[in-house]
Image (cartoon, rainbow, N blue to C red):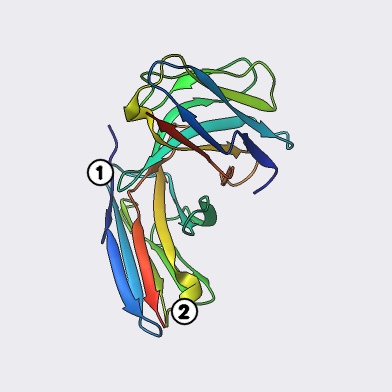
Amino acid sequence: NAGVTQTPKFRVLKTGQSMTLLCAQDMNHEYMYWYRQDPGMGLRLIHYSVGEGTTAKGEVPDGYNVSRLKKQNFLLGLESAAPSQTSVYFCAIRDRVEEETQYFGPGTRLLVL
Amino acid sequence: GQQVMQIPQYQHVQEGEDFTTYCNSSTTLSNIQWYKQRPGGHPVFLIQLVKSGEVKKQKRLTFQFGEAKKNSSLHITATQTTDVGTYFCAGRRSGYSTLTFGKGTMLLVSP
């Protein structure tokens, strides 16, 4: 999966707790994306970044914040977790020079009780 | 906003039967991509189509992009159990840096 790692692999949170998901790449790709996947809903874009220091909102950004302080890392934060945020979270990267292929990380499974 | 519809949501076939999934966009696309996700896994890129009317083949898989660049299809000939998974299409509009994914078609193949 093109050197994309996600931390943690699985996490259980209580409502109101906070956490940060880390996506790290060992490539030099500019674009990074955070998606959530829910049963029957496909992949929905939360936030994305087109380069170090930049972030932008996707389709479902509410309740999430992101940061891209270093080119190789893209952080997704949940300030106050809600049960509706129970999902599988995927990070993806894309090389602006290449054919726009997105390479996905292995995913983080989050359960909010 | 842009919508990408995919049908069917689910299909169960016997090994050796053919399978087709269809993707339709509410807007004209710059390109369309197809991904496969095995159960418990992550989406894996299969192919990208860019040109109007384009047809690409990968062994038993045939991908088509419509003339109007608003629809696409994936056809699998003589399915095998290794084809099991969910197939997603994802479209990008000109000028945008993001993809919009369809909800996927889950394929189950019985031996």
Near mark 1 (Cα within 10 A), the count class, few <14, some 14-19 or many ≥20, is few
Q: Is residue B41 above or below residue A105?
A: below
User: Label 1, on which residue?
Assistant: B26
* Residue found 40% across the figure and 53% down from its top: B89
- Whether the residues at callouts 2 and 1 have beta carbons within 8 Å, the answer is no
Quadrant in the picture for the C terminus of chain A: top left
Pick the residue in front: B55 or A90.
A90
| A102 on left or right of B105 | right
To which chain does the residue with label 1 belong? B
Kind of residue at badge 1: Ser
* Residue B73 visible to the viewer: no
In 3D space, how far apart are the residues under numbered discs 2 and 1 (Cα atoms)? 32 Å
Location of residue A88 in the rendering, given as x and y in whole percent from the top left corner? 45, 39
Give the quarter of the image for residue B100: top left
User: Label 2, on which residue?
Assistant: B80
Q: Is residue B1 above or below residue A64?
A: below
Q: Secondary structure at mark 2?
A: loop
To which chain does the residue with label 2 belong? B
Kind of residue at badge 2: Gln
Pick the residue in front: A11 or B13.
A11
* Residue found 40% across the figure and 85% down from its top: B16
